[in-house]
């Protein structure tokens, strides 16, 4: 099959690599691969601590995706020699005061009821696991199964893997329209002249937030079915990157998530010394970093890990997450030959492996005689119903 994927963020790249290594012919179209939300993401692969009661349907994707990540990271490294930063140091969840502890205990009970593994830990045990934690915390929990990857490194590896496939290419251009043509679709890129049309049996829309709005016109890609609504809205996140100096110790390893006066903050140490502090959730349409957001993140992070005050601030970044009204992705067929894989909101890095497996199953096997590999995530096809891209139309 000829497959064209519009959008080369973590979702489009993962789908592109999975289809290419399965023997399909793949064209990825994106003026700035991995320049969207993927560039900002911390990379928590947190099926447990990202679980919220209202998002229980997400477990059908998050649990198999988290389980598939280690093999995915190994395969990617074997194919490219490039690392993904995958590590599984677990997550500590800490409470700043008694009210925060109560809220976290409630959430942990809901997570356990959903079959996820999280246990209460004394604050002394939490400080033994992460000595940089503040001495006065009100409670601590441990989710040993949560993992992490570095989205920028993963995207670089995926791009390298796609470009190394003989039947795959990346066009650094914007897609402007899809037009039914010869039993498939012609995707117009750039100015859309005849030399700028790519024919495909299957087109995958992996545009992230793209341009916000409901229909084809707002997205800036003409020709999508008129009745299909795409309620993807930008939910901006600010995130900071720090590193220890000669006057400070690096954190020990686990990701620390904290509730401070009812607001969440996370501190994610990477093996290369970088520490990611995130993230706000804003719906104010401000593309740049919010001063208030950055202030709040650093203030709350310092409350649970005062030693961060001696670190160097390397970077403050903001990007828009692709949010949907029910916080679930749009993943499935829009029309024959047209697939949606967008709206991954806070979880696109975690869910990228499941997205690749789901789209690969929709497209079906290639006929190139390449040896088949097992799907990267073991999805239950019935579990995908809640993600029907037509549910808002
Ligand atoms: C601050 C922050 C922290 C986050 N932390 C985490 C985390 O810890 N764990 C996690 O799992 N997720 C996290 N996320 C969420 C995650 O980043 C997103 O869910 C994920 O990046 C979505 O991937 P995507 O490929 O759909 O979108 P994007 O990464 O935004 O990529 C979309 C791509 O589509 C391209 N595009 C758009 N329109 C067109 C067009 N017309 N033609 C061609 N190309 C087009 C864009 O250029 C872009 O490259 C975080 C997000 C933010 C902002």
Image (tube, rainbow, N blue to C red):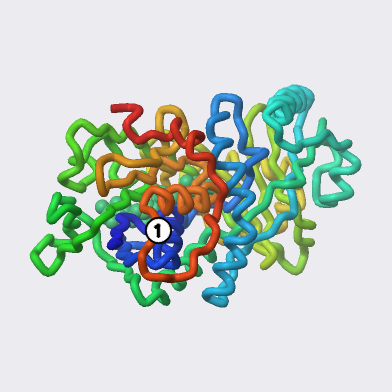
Q: Residue 86 placed where, x, y %?
A: 64, 61
Q: Residue 16 placed where, x, y %?
A: 40, 61
Q: Residue 47 placed where, x, y %?
A: 63, 42
Residue 292 visible, this angle: no
> Which residue sits at x=19%, y=57%?
187
* 259 left or right of 248 in image: left
Please count the marks in the image. 1
- The residue nearer to you, when weighing 164 against 305, is 164
Q: Vertical placement of 292 versus 274: above or below?
A: above
Quadrant of the image containing the C terminus: top left
> Which residue sits at x=74%, y=54%?
89
* 321 left or right of 244 in image: left
- The residue nearer to you, when weighing 266 against 49, is 49
Q: Vertical placement of 96 versus 67: above or below?
A: above
> Which residue sits at x=71%, y=49%?
255
Asked which quadrant contains residue 113, the reply is: top right
Residue 335 visible, this angle: yes
Residue labelled with disc 1: 365
Asked which quadrant contains residue 169, the reply is: bottom left
Q: Residue 54 placed where, x, y %?
A: 55, 25
Quadrant of the image containing the N terminus: bottom left
Q: Residues within 10 Å of mark 1 (few under 14, many from 20)?
A: some
Is the CB–ligand 1 distance for label 1 below 8 Å? no
- Name the element at disc 1: loop
> Which residue sits at x=48%, y=39%?
381
Q: Vertical placement of 65 versus 245: above or below?
A: above
Q: Vertical placement of 106 versus 256: above or below?
A: above
* 377 left or right of 26 in image: right
């Amino acid at each position: 099959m000829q497959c064209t994927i519009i959008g080369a963020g973590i979702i489009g790249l993962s789908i592109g690599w999975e289809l290419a290594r399965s023997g399909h012919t793949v064209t990825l179209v994106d003026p700035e691969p991995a320049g969207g939300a993927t560039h900002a993401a911390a990379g928590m692969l947190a099926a447990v601590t990202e679980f919220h009661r209202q998002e229980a349907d997400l477990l059908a994707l998050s649990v198999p995706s988290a389980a598939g990540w280690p093999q995915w990271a190994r395969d990617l490294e074997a194919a490219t020699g490039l690392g993904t930063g995958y590590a599984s140091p677990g997550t500590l969840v800490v409470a700043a005061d008694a009210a925060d502890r109560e809220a976290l205990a409630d959430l942990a009970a809901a997570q356990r009821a959903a079959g996820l593994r999280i246990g209460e830990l004394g604050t002394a045990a939490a400080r033994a696991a992460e000595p940089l934690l503040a001495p006065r915390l009100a409670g601590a929990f441990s989710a040993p199964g949560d993992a992490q990857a570095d989205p920028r490194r993963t995207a670089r590896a995926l791009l390298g893997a796609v470009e190394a496939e003989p039947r795959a290419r990346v066009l650094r251009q914007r897609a402007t329209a899809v037009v039914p043509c010869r039993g498939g679709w012609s995707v117009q890129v750039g100015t859309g002249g005849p030399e700028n049309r790519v024919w495909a049996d299957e087109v995958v829309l992996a545009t992230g937030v793209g341009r916000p709005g409901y229909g084809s016109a707002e997205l800036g890609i003409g020709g999508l079915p008129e009745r299909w609504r795409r309620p993807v809205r930008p939910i901006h996140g600010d995130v900071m990157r720090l590193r220890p100096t000669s006057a400070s110790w690096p954190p020990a390893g686990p990701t620390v998530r904290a509730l401070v006066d009812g607001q969440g903050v996370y501190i994610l140490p990477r093996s290369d010394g970088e520490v990611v502090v995130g993230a706000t959730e804003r719906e104010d349409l401000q593309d740049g970093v919010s001063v208030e957001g950055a202030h709040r993140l650093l203030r709350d992070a310092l409350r649970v890990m005062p030693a961060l005050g001696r670190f160097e601030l390397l970077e403050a970044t903001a990007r828009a997450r692709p949010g949907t009204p029910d916080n679930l992705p749009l993943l499935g067929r829009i029309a024959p030959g047209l697939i949606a894989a967008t709206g991954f909101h806070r979880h696109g890095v975690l869910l990228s492996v499941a997205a690749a497996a789901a789209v690969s199953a929709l497209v079906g096997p290639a006929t190139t005689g390449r040896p088949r590999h097992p799907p990267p995530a073991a999805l239950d096809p019935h579990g995908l119903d809640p993600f029907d891209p037509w549910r808002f139309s």
